[in-house]
Amino acid sequence: MDLIEQTIAAIGPLDEAAMAQARDLQSRLTKPPGSLGVLEELSVRLAGLAGRCPPPLPEPAAVAIFAADHGVHAQGVSPWPQEVTAQMVANFLAGGAVVNAFAAQVGAQVTVVDVGVAAPLEDAPGLLVRKVAPGTADMTRAPAMTADQARRALRVGIEVAGELVAAGHRCLLTGDMGIANTTASAALIAAFTGLPPERVTGRGTGIDDATHRHKIDVVRTALTRHGLLAQAARKPGDGRTSPAAAGPPQGAAASAGSPASTPDGAPVSDPLRVLAAVGGLEHAALAGFILGGAAARVPVVLDGVIAGAAALVAAALCPQAMAACVAGHRSAEPGHTATVEHLGLRPLVDLHLRLGEGTGALLALPLVQGAVRVLHEVATFDSAGVSDKSGSPPGRVSRSAID
């Protein structure tokens, strides 16, 4: 069996017994029930992921920055030259980027993975050279990757996740670097959610209005070429009829790992074809990284829109993988909001970030760790000798007494 299939087969459901134990423990801690809000829900889910209560503390943590270049850069979607990808990799390795500062703040290891940088990179401490190809093809003219390249990049991500877990890391964070990668992300998000390009295509590094309009047109062109433009996403007046609702339900009704849709509304039967058509090598590797973390039953904290697009791929391949995922933050990119809603994930931080690199995931890491630490270290009413809100003396507190 291939590594991808093996990894998917290893991903199982959350442990309901462990989750029930975590809920019971939360109800007996010295605080009002539900007072930690989303963090309580997160602690319960992580107990289910680990299969025990309390779950292991999600530390030490490691952020893996998958770097790759994009052929669609030739379409003028970014004012930054493609050389910046390799230059930023060098900056990461020198410790001079924002991701390095944030990682130092929270005590996370930084690993950079060259999965598709156009320029050749020399071996260096902290760098894993796993190059599948020197960037993708221009997705407006041909598939961005071959099927073999997409699968190889997926395997790179799975392998890196496995290596980091084997080295003792108990929480994985996604990072990325690649000039023009928000264009490929928008194409993936539109393809997997059925939303129109103008709803999911943002300004990336801060492009002007004219470039933004052009970027939307480039995404639309790529989707059309590969037969991935949903009916609702077609321009008005093109002679086609759009359905009343495009894509899966949004908001609270969306379920994690909702299936992607083809233009006729049917579930995507081959998410790897979509990935190869309009994705990036770092998207493929990140999708594998997510699958690898889920198979190892460790939390995977997602960064922004690039990680979100990769998570759509992972969810299409294995919906249960989303149980391991935590949306670290909500990116300022509009496609990211569409993505987390589609996947049923709730971002922990919303600071209008749009940097990438893993920065938003790193800022959320203390929240993830704190949610679990509560289960380890906070006393129960009984053990602390604290009366519950009904006035019951310590040692006689029941769950019903504090509901």
Image (cartoon, grey):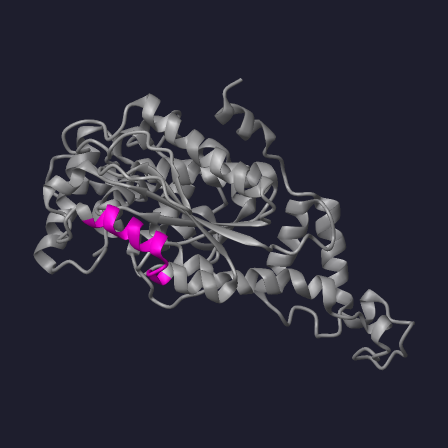
Q: Position of residue 148 (x, y in %)?
A: 34, 21
Q: Inspect this view and state whether residue 330 appears.
A: no
- Relative vertical location of residue 17 with respect to residue 370 in this rendering, above or below: above
- Relative vertical location of residue 188 with respect to residue 91 in this rendering, above or below: above
Residue 138 lies left or right of residue 333; in this view the side is left
Residue 135 lies left or right of residue 286; in this view the side is left
**Which quarter of the rendering shows the C terminus?**
bottom right
Q: Residue 88: within the magenta?
A: yes
Q: Quadrant of residue 358?
A: bottom left
Point 67% across, 63% down: residue: 373
Residue 286 lies left or right of residue 17; in this view the side is left
Q: Residue 188: within the magenta?
A: no
Point 46% across, 58% down: residue: 328
Which of the pair 265/91 is nearer the observer?
A: 91
Which of the pair 57/396 is nearer the observer?
A: 57
Point 14% across, 29% down: residue: 141
Tell me where the magenta segment starts and ends, as one range.
84-98
